[in-house]
Structure formats: C-alpha cells, structure tokens
Amino acid sequence: MDRVPILNLGSCLLVSVQVDLHDRLALALQEDLASEIVRHHARGVLIDISSLDMVDSFIGRVLGNIAAVSRVLAAETVIVGMRPAVAITLVELGVRWEGVRTAISVERGMALLQGQGTPGGKARDVVRRDR
C-alpha cells in the first residue's frame, strides 16, 4: 500500500492508519490530507492511530505537522486511539503537538470535532445518549 485511505464524513475527514506508518507514507499522508481538506472544505480531521505499536520522533513530528497544516487550512485535527506506550514514547522524545487535540476513541474524537464535548466530559455523555 502506498497511500493511507482518507474517508469523507460530511464536514470531517477520517483517517484510520492500519499499516506501518513509515516515513515516506507519513509524508504522502500529509500531502493527501491537505489536498482533501481543500477539496471537501473539511472543518475537521480525525486520525486514528490505534493500530500503531510505535511512533518514532519523525512520525510524531509529521503528525504534528499534519495538524498544523490542517489548522492553516481552517480544519481542526483530533488524534485518537493512542496506546499508552506511544504516548510515553512521544513525551520522552520531546515531541510537542501544539494545538492538537486527542481523544481516547473515534466516538469521542468525532464528538470533539462536532463541538459536543471534551475528551473526558460531555463527549462521553453524547456517546451514551446515542446508544
């Protein structure tokens, strides 16, 4: 696979990384997402990294850059599904994601993008009402 699929969900784009995100693929994702944000007039980008066991400093920086590019294009980014080991590694590597929101699950991330809550607060309530 030489591209990560990007799904259009109304005003949001959904990216579920299901493969090893090597450097070249991460850079391709950054370019593809920027194009898709403009093409679909997307207001939000949700990136699911739950299948990633490891994130190195380069991939961490690219994810931060994706969020920065999205923000310049007027779209908010939420990264979801981060494993504890990945979070610890990113902190230890000193990777900073300025303005990037995170959520524990796709449902909570979508609630954040739709302005319905915070990671630990109202989003949970929204998910419960939907069940």
Image (spheres, rainbow, N blue to C red):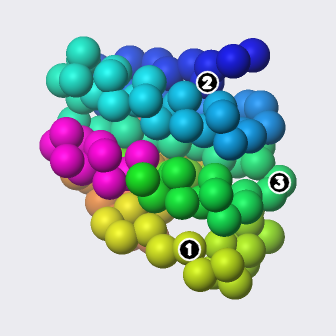
Label drawn at residue 68: none
Disc on the earlier residue, 3 or 2:
2
For mark 1, give the secondary structure: loop
Q: Which residue is mark 2?
A: 4
Which residue sits at x=55%, y=37%? 27
Main SS category, magenta section: helix
- Residue 59 showing in the rendered view: yes
Q: Amino acid at mark 2?
A: Val
| Circle 2 SS class | loop
Q: CA distance from mark 3 to mark 2?
A: 17 Å
- Which residue range is magenta in the image? 66-75
- The residues bearing labels 3 and 1 have C-alpha atoms spaced at a distance of 17 Å
First in sequence: mark 3 vs mark 1: 3
Task: Provide the residue designation for mark 1.
Answer: 95
Instruction: Return the residue at label 3.
Output: 53
Q: Is residue 70 magenta?
A: yes
* Residue 129 seen in the figure: no
Relative image position of residue 101 (x, y in whole percent): 39, 62
Residue type for callout 1: Val
Q: In the drawing, does residue 67 fall left or right of residue 93?
A: left
Residue at 24 percent across and 50 percent down: it is: 71
Instruction: Give the Cα distance between marks 2 and 1.
Output: 23 Å
Between tags 3 and 1, which lies in front?
1
Q: Nearer the viewer, residue 69 or 87?
A: 69
